[in-house]
Amino acid sequence: MQARTTYLAKLLSAKQLKLITIESCTGGLLGAKCTDVAGSSSWFEAGYITYSNRAKQVFVGVEKELIERYGAVSKQVAIAMAKGGAQNISANN
């Protein structure tokens, strides 16, 4: 995993891009792996850990009805989480 994270770091840095993670079942593991890389603050912007359904609604704006219809661990909810996290970061920059 470290080699992949280092590769990702180099790629993002070269393209001057920032990474945002929005996690649930992984409980922040992806963000932790990213921040284990020295200098990650230059390419790792933020991470959300939205483990509960309520956190998904409050922090990244996933609609309760979407969770009820498709389930918290679904493609539809994952897409909504990603969009909501990206919108939150954009609104704060």
Image (cartoon, helix red, strand yellow):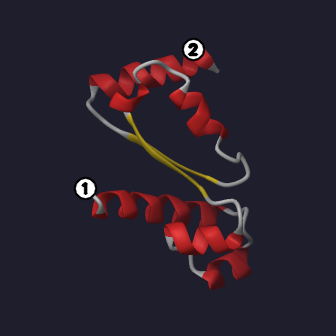
Q: Position of residue 73 (x, y in %)?
A: 73, 62
Element carrying mark 2 = helix
What residue is shown with label 1? 93
Q: Nearer the viewer, mark 2 or mark 1?
A: 1
* Badge 1: residue crowd in 10 Å (few <14, some 14–19, many ≥20): few
- Considering every residue shown, the one lying at the far bottom of the view is 65
Q: Position of residue 4 (x, y in %)?
A: 56, 20
Instruction: Report whether 73 appears left or right of 80.
Output: right
Q: Position of residue 45 (x, y in %)?
A: 39, 42
In which quarter of the view is residue 87 placed?
A: bottom left
- The disc placed on residue 3 is 2
- The disc placed on residue 23 is none
Instruction: Report whether 8 appears left or right of 52.
Output: left
Q: Report how many numbered discs are placed on residues in the image.
A: 2
Taking 22 as reference, is 1 above or below it?
above
Indicate which disc, 2 or 1, sits on the residue closer to the N terminus. Answer: 2
Residue depicted at 46% across the width and 60% down the height: 85
Calculate the distance from the C-alpha at mark 2 to the C-alpha at mark 1. 30 Å
Residue depicted at 46% across the width and 65% down the height: 84
Q: Quadrant of the N terminus?
A: top right
Taking 78 as reference, is 20 above or below it?
above
Q: Quadrant of the C terminus?
A: bottom left
Instruction: Report whether 14 appears left or right of 73.
Output: left
Mark 2 residue type? Ala
Residue depicted at 29% across the width and 60% down the height: 92
Q: Nearer the viewer, residue 49 or 83?
A: 49
Element carrying mark 1 = loop
Taking 23 as reference, is 33 above or below it?
above
* Badge 2: residue crowd in 10 Å (few <14, some 14–19, many ≥20): few
Q: Position of residue 44 (x, y in %)?
A: 41, 36
Mark 1 residue type? Asn
